[in-house]
């Protein structure tokens, strides 16, 4: 099968109780594709500016990520700045500079159009819509979003949601979007709007995958050291969709295992700043943590 990931490739400035990093490589499609690359060969659709470092491109290539859909435009790369306090589930977006993303017109390479799985990362919902107009009968469409679009483009976002199979959202985003303080009621109301499944990410408390006749809860790996929570959501999506692409199945067992692999990938990325942890991560470590999950929930 094949997995196409649409989202940002970015510079992130991050401040957490463990320190501050200026303009390190990040972005929703970067995190998602790196997590997925441990299971399959994902394809990225995104845009970077002239200032994006070649070493980062080389690293993505080394990981087997297809970059035919990564466009270089004149101008600056997307830049996002966020600050986390002692509660890793609470973050403040300090700055979003769309830069080359502001005028990005996604144009899918021909071989991307027949992808089996499409992930629409947290970019402008109008750009997500443009992607959907170009794909030919994918088997599974998943989407994510971020507060900015809930606050500024909610109608476009809800239109995209009608066409997707899985919606990934964190607790704060889902409550903001539905204006419903009870997460289960909020998740159920999103199921009425199109998706068959809603993956509700609750940070260090794990993930709840809700379907019409289905509910599955995954604990987060008990991490003692959360250095930088950025990218946890996208890495969850990458592990989840990368695993489904690898096993070529969307049945209930595959969905449950995918959610555990998603959690495992999220638990690794937060151990260091940015994408650093993916640089020395091995599949053996992933498998080991996946097996630890079984013990964690066995009773
Ligand atoms: P996550 O922590 O998984 O929710 O995603 C964080 C990533 O999303 C960061 O690497 C940011 O660069 C990226 N990001 C934040 N805001 C936006 C936005 N408005 N559009 C696209 N990407 C964004």
Image: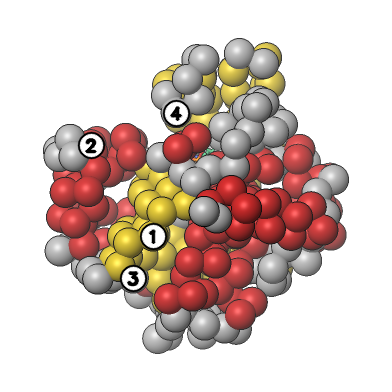
Depth check: 19 or 252 in front?
252
Depth check, front residue: 270 or 50 = 270
Task: Mark 1 and ligand 1: say if the CB distance to the nearest ligand atom is below 8 Å.
Answer: no
User: Which tag, 3 or 2, sits closer to the chain's start?
Assistant: 3
Colour scheme in the image? secondary structure
- Provide the residue designation for mark 1: 216
Can you give x and y, in whole percent of width and height, for residue 25 in the image? 68, 38
Q: Residue 292 at what x, y percent from top left? A: 67, 52
Binning the other alpha carbons within 10 Å of mark 4 as few (below 14), some (14 to 19) or many (20 upward) gives some
Please report the residue visible at 40 percent of the width from the left and 86 percent of the height from the top: 137
Query: What separation in Å lies between label 3 and label 2 (alpha carbons)?
Result: 21 Å
Mark carried by residue 176: 2
Question: Does residue 77 sit above or below 67 in this rendering?
Answer: above
Instruction: Please report whichever mark, 3 or 4, sits nearer to the chain's N-terminal start.
Output: 4
* Residue 43, quarter of the rendered image: bottom right
* Quadrant in the rendering for residue 245: bottom right
Taking the spot 68% from the left edge, 58% from the top edge, the residue there is: 291
Foreground: disc 1 or disc 3: 1
- Tag 3 residue: 165
Pick the quarter of the image with the N terminus: bottom right
Q: Position of residue 158 (x, y in %)?
A: 21, 56
The residue tagged 4 is: 89
Task: Tell whether label 2 touches label 1 (CB within 8 Å).
Answer: no
Residue appearing at x 61%, y 80% in the figure? 247
Mark 1 vs 3: CB contact within 8 A: no
């Amino acid at each position: 099968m094949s997995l196409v990931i649409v989202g940002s490739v970015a510079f992130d400035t991050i401040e957490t109780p463990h320190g501050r990093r200026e303009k390190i490589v990040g972005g929703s499609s970067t995190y998602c594709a790196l997590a997925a690359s441990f299971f399959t060969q994902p394809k990225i659709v995104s845009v970077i500016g002239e200032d994006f470092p070649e070493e980062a491109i080389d690293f993505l290539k080394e990981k087997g990520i297809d970059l035919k859909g990564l466009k270089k435009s004149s101008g600056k790369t997307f830049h996002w700045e966020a600050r986390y306090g002692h509660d890793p589930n609470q973050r403040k977006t300090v700055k979003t500079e769309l830069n080359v993303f502001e005028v990005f017109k996604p144009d899918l390479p021909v071989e991307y159009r027949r992808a089996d799985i499409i992930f629409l990362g947290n970019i402008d919902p109008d750009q997500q819509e443009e992607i959907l107009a170009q794909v030919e009968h994918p088997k599974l469409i998943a989407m994510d979003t971020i507060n900015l679009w809930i606050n500024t483009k909610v109608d476009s976002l809800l239109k995209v949601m009608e066409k997707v199979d899985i919606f990934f959202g964190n607790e704060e985003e889902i409550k903001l979007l539905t204006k419903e303080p009870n997460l289960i009621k909020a998740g159920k109301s999103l199921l009425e709007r199109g998706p068959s499944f809603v993956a509700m990410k609750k940070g260090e408390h794990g993930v709840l995958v809700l379907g019409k006749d289905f509910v599955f809860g995954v604990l987060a790996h008990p991490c003692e050291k959360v250095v930088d929570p950025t990218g946890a959501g996208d890495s969850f999506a990458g592990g989840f969709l990368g695993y489904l692409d690898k096993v070529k199945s969307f049945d209930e067992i595959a969905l449950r295992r995918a959610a555990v692999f998603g959690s495992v990938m999220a638990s690794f990325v937060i151990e260091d700043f940015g994408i650093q942890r993916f640089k020395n991560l091995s599949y053996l470590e992933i498998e080991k943590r996946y097996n630890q999950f079984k013990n964690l929930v066995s009773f």
